[in-house]
Amino acid sequence: METETEATSGDESVRVWLVDRTYSDDEQNLIILTYATPDGERDFRKERALTSYTGDHRETPVSMAVDADNLGHVADDETRERYAGEVERMRAKHDRDDVL
C-alpha cells in the first residue's frame, strides 16, 4: 500500500487524488480541479483554463504529490465523506500516475 506522505527534495509532500471538476462561477473558461487526501480531510485546488484542454497537453492527472503547506482543510463532514469516497473510487480504478 502506498504511503500518504512522500519525501520530495527534503520537503514533505502528500499524495492527493482528483475528487471533483467544476466550472468556475466567477471566471469564464476556468475549470477548478479539486484533489483530496484519502481521508477527505485536506484538499488542494488547481485552476486550469478551458483552452488548456486542447492540443497535446489536455491530460489531467488522477493524483499528484503536493507540498503539505499547500493543502486546505475541509470543514464540512459531508464534503469530507464525499471526498474520501471519491478517493477510494479513483484508487480502485486508477494507478496513481494515470491521467484522464
Image (cartoon, rainbow, N blue to C red):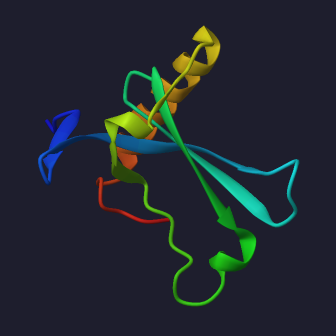
State the image coordinates of residue 37 (x, y, percent, origin top left). 39, 31
The residue at 62%/20% (across/down) is 79
Place residue 42 in its image quadrant.
top left
Q: Decide if residue 35 is on the left or right side of residue 39.
A: right
Q: Residue furthest top?
A: 77
The residue at 70%/69% (across/down) is 49
Q: Decide if residue 14 is on the left or right side of residue 100.
A: left
Vertical placement of residue 95 versus 17, above or below: below
Quadrant containing the N terminus is top left
State the image coordinates of residue 25 (x, y, percent, origin top left). 87, 48
State the image coordinates of residue 88 (x, y, percent, origin top left). 40, 32
The residue at 42%/43% (across/down) is 17
Q: Decide if residue 3 is on the left or right side of residue 49.
A: left
Place residue 7 in its image quadrant.
top left
Vertical placement of residue 29 versus 77, above or below: below
Vertical placement of residue 30 versus 69, above or below: below
The residue at 87%/63% (across/down) is 28
State the image coordinates of residue 5 (x, y, percent, origin top left). 20, 35
Vertical placement of residue 20 versus 24, above or below: above
> Between residues 18 and 86, which one lies in front from this camera angle?
18
